[in-house]
Structure formats: C-alpha cells, structure tokens
Image (cartoon, rainbow, N blue to C red):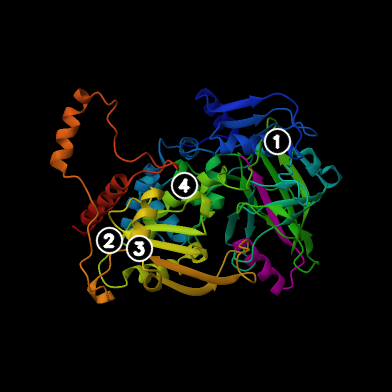
C-alpha cells in the first residue's frame, strides 16, 4: 500500500485514534521535544503540532513510534509480511545492483512497480522560493536538547549522486541550520554521502549538488535509513515496500530528482574545497551528546513545498525513542538477507537499549565447534553489522526477543575465560566508548551449549521443561482450579517483536520456496 503523502498517513493514524492534534502554541526550541520525549517513553501516539512558534507549517513527530504505526507506514498489517516477501525474493535470487533490480522487475510482474519513474510536475513544487527568497527560518526546525549546537533537521532524505558513476544515494543525515540559507551536512565517514563528497574533493570539484526531501510517503523516510547493499537504489526498495513506483520530478536549481509527493524539498550544493564548519553538539540516539566536529556547509539555492505541507521530525536521545521502531523494522526486514549469508540463523534481536550497534542477540542452529565465533566474524564483515560492538550467540531454542530468557540462558552457560573472544575493528563514528574515534574493540559472547571438541568434558545439561502431555492436561483442568485466567507462557516481549515460532515459520516458508525453485 502506498501513501500519497504524509498528510494521508496522518489522517489514517487519526482515524485509528493513534494521533493527537495539538492546537496550543508550542515553541520549536526545546518545548516540542520535551513533550515528545514524555510521549515516546510512555508508548503514546503520534503528535501533530498545528501551531509551532515562528512557522506556519504543522509538525508531525512520533509517527513511527510503535510497531503498529511502523507497519502501517510501510503499508502492511505487520512488518513480518514484508519479511516474508523479502524471504521469497532472496530465494529467487536477490539482485546485486540497481540495474539488476530493474532487470528482475521486467521479468517478474510482482516487481513491475519497483523502478522509480519521472513525471513533469509534482505536489512538492506547488510553491517555490529561490535566491533571496530562500529562508530556512520558515520551517519549524527543532532544537531537541539544551546543549544542542542549534536547530537540527532530524528526518531528512538526503539525495546525492556519485560524481563519477552518477549512482544515486538517499541517506538520512541530520542537518544543523546555520542561517536562512545554509546548513551543515552531517554525513558520517562510513556513509555513502560522505564517500560521494570525498570523491568530489579528489576530483577537484567546487560544487556537489544535494537535494533534501522531507515528508511524502513514510516508506521513503524509512528507505533512507535502511542498510541496503551497495548499489541497490533506495527508491527501488521503497517501490517494493509500497507496491507502487516512486514518482520523481527534476529540481528547480540543481540537476537532481526528488520524490514528487514530498512535502518540502531543500535544494543546494556543498563545495568540497571549502573549509569545513563546526557542527554540534547534538543529543544523539546513543542518549549522549556527540561533540563538535567539522562537516561541509550546504548552500541552499531553493526551497519548494506543497501548499498544505507538513514538516516531519523525530527526536533521538536516551532510549526508548521513536527511532527504535525504524531500527526494529530493519531488524525484521533484513533478517532474510542475513539468512542468505548465514542460513544457520534462527532469529536476531537488536535491543533498543543497545542503540542497535552496541548489542546483537542472535540464535543459531549450532552445527560444529566454534560455530558462534564463525558467525560473529561473518557479521562483523556484513555491511553495517560491522559496527556491532557486542554479539551474543545463543542456541536455537532460546527466544532472543525475550531479554530475560537471554540473560538467564547466557549467564547459565557462560565461562567468561572460554566464551569471550575479542577483536579490533571499525566502530560507529558516534561511538564514544573507545579511547579514540572510528576504531575500537568488539566482543563475541558464545552462549551456546558446548561440544566435547570445544574442550567441554562433561555432559551438557538440558533446561527444565514440563512435558507437553502434562501441560495439555493442566490447560484442560485450569478453569476448575479457580486461579484466574490461564497464563500463556512468558510475558510478551516489551519491544513487540514476534516469538521464535513466528520466525521459524518464516524460515519454513523460505525453505519451501527454495525447494520449489530447485524442483
């Protein structure tokens, strides 16, 4: 299902009583975020601020802040529907690059909607300001935390092209507003936008064009955050999710395309040979302020927008926050891709409290000695999983979505001297734990049952479980016991993720599809 814009998505949330309109005047400096912080931590609804000081644009925040809202944003009843669809796709052979995706789309009717296509006009350009009329101050750009270096655009879709190949990239990189006509592009050193910038500098270019889309179909914002394989176009992925092609229009002042149904578009360029400027501090998704660092200045050449545009924003900081569900969507959707590389994986959990790159819980079907170490090293070589600081590997019968069960099973099985393996490698640029930036140590914690080949000379014990026969008899007699409603196992995971049984079903479907393809 596709959304014609963020306004349509907001109306759908309101019809579900999952959005609150706030008509009272609220300041974009700290007040909006102080309200949103409490609502996010309380598991509350999306918020549409209709009267933000200094701006005529309404502001939408926390629209991704629950599993149900994240699923609705991507046009499905539940995220596992997309996980199943991706499992089918990878079993047919996932394309390696954008051209291959287009080729596959021509072959498979179900993917005919994938490639984006250009149109001559779009709602995002109903109103246009260029030259002296450019004014970032008209947007309700938020200052989130008291020590932030200024107002930040927090949910942008930043569009750049490789200066040599012309390949497009869409990334979500925060932007600090400097003045009416300039902002700072915070693309971290490992990101594709930063790579485009470095290559432009190597080529001696004085102008690298940038476009920033805000709003539109929420699948576009998610696609900008997704850790796609290099060469896979974010808008093709969004087209796959929304089952409708992304339509694009040419910008007014730069040679780039933007989603036609975006709410706001900021056009401009960075000068790769210009001196970098100080950016930050910024209260980040780690829950800590990231310090001042130097990044390129974006010179804004035009701002266009819908006549009824809504400005989308998010708040990051001490978890849980709205971005937890963007990360959870990635966890569920990209699990089939990881299984393509590591078929032994049963399930994976990136706990919100770990800020996603700090802690990975993964269960596997163990097949040989030191299998856990092999998997950890493989994950450290797989795209953005390379930034994972702590990887805990557990047996297939452990529900990694149940953190309490993980703690019990992991600690019960652990011999620290035997089961902790340390390596050095790259870390996320925002990680402040290491003694220096960009690299540090990581650890694999092997919580699997040990084999004799691994030096374990005793018989490994089995966890205590009630027999299925007795459990069924107790279920039948329960209404006569007068205790109350029948408990159904352990409490539901607090992050709303599915249990192992659902994940196992995904695996079974994927294997069935593979068997059909081979047959």
Residues in magenta, as a range: 191-215
Which is more N-terminal, label 1 or label 4? 1
Q: Are marks 4 and 1 in contact (CB under 8 Å)?
A: no
Q: Which residue is mark 1?
A: 32
Horizontal relation, residue 207 to residue 119: left or right: right
Which is more N-terminal, label 2 or label 3? 2
- Viewer-nearest residue: 7 or 330: 330
Q: Residue 70, can we see it?
A: yes
- At x 59% / y 45%, what residue is drawn? 248
**In x, y percent, where is residue 402?**
38, 47
Check disc 4: other Cα within 10 Å, few if <14, some if 14-19, many if 20+: many
**In x, y percent, where is residue 456?**
26, 73
Horizontal relation, residue 280 to residue 242: left or right: right
Q: Which residue is mark 3?
A: 447
Residue 365's disc number: 2
Q: Is residue 428 above or below residue 151?
A: below
Q: Residue 295, can we see it?
A: no
């Amino acid at each position: 299902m596709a959304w014609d814009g963020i306004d349509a998505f907001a109306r759908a949330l309101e019809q579900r009583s999952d959005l609150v309109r706030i008509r009272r005047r609220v300041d974009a400096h700290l007040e909006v975020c102080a309200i949103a912080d409490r609502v996010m931590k309380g598991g509350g609804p999306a918020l549409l601020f209709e009267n933000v000081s200094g701006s005529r644009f309404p502001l939408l925040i926390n629209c991704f802040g629950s599993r149900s809202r994240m699923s609705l944003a991507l046009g499905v009843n539940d995220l596992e529907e997309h996980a199943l669809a991706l499992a089918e796709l990878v079993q047919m052979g996932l394309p390696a690059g954008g051209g291959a995706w287009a080729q596959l789309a021509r072959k498979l009717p179900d993917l005919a909607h994938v490639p984006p296509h250009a149109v001559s006009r779009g709602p995002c350009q109903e109103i246009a300001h260029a030259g002296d009329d450019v004014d970032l101050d008209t947007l309700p750009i938020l200052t989130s935390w008291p020590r932030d270096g200024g107002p930040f655009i927090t949910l942008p879709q930043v569009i750049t092209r490789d200066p040599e190949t012309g390949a497009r990239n869409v990334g979500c990189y925060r932007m600090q507003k400097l003045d009416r006509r300039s902002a700072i592009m915070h693309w971290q050193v490992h990101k594709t936008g930063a790579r485009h910038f470095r290559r432009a500098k190597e080529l001696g270019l004085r102008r690298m064009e940038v476009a920033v889309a805000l709003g539109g179909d929420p699948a576009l914002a998610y696609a900008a955050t997704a850790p796609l394989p290099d060469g896979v176009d974010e808008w093709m992925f969004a087209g796959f999710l929304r089952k409708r092609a992304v339509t694009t229009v040419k910008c007014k002042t730069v040679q780039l395309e933007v989603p036609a149904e975006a709410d706001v578009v900021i056009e401009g360029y960075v000068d790769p040979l210009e001196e970098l400027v100080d950016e930050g501090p910024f209260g980040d998704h780690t829950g800590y302020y990231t310090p001042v660092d130097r990044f390129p200045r974006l010179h804004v050449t035009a701002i266009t927008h819908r006549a009824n545009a809504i400005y989308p924003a998010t708040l990051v900081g001490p978890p849980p926050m709205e971005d937890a569900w963007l990360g959870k969507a990635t966890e569920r959707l990209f699990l089939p891709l990881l299984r393509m590389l590591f078929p032994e994986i049963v399930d994976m959990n990136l706990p919100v409290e770990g800020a996603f790159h700090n802690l990975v819980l993964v269960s596997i079907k163990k097949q040989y000695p030191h299998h856990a170490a092999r998997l950890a090293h493989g994950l450290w070589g797989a795209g953005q999983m390379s930034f994972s600081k702590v990887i805990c590997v557990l047996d297939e019968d452990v529900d990694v979505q149940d953190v309490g069960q993980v703690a019990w099973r992991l600690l019960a099985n652990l011999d620290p001297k035997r089961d902790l393996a340390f390596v050095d490698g790259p870390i996320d640029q925002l990680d402040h734990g290491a003694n220096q930036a960009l690299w540090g140590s990581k650890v694999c914690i092997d919580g699997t049952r040990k084999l004799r080949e691994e030096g374990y000379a005793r018989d490994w014990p089995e966890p205590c479980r009630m027999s299925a026969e007795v459990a069924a008899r107790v279920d039948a007699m329960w209404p006569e016991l007068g205790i109350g409603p029948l408990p159904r196992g352990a409490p539901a995971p607090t992050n709303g993720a599915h249990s192992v049984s659902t994940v196992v079903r995904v695996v079974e479907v994927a294997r069935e599809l593979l068997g059909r393809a081979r047959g």
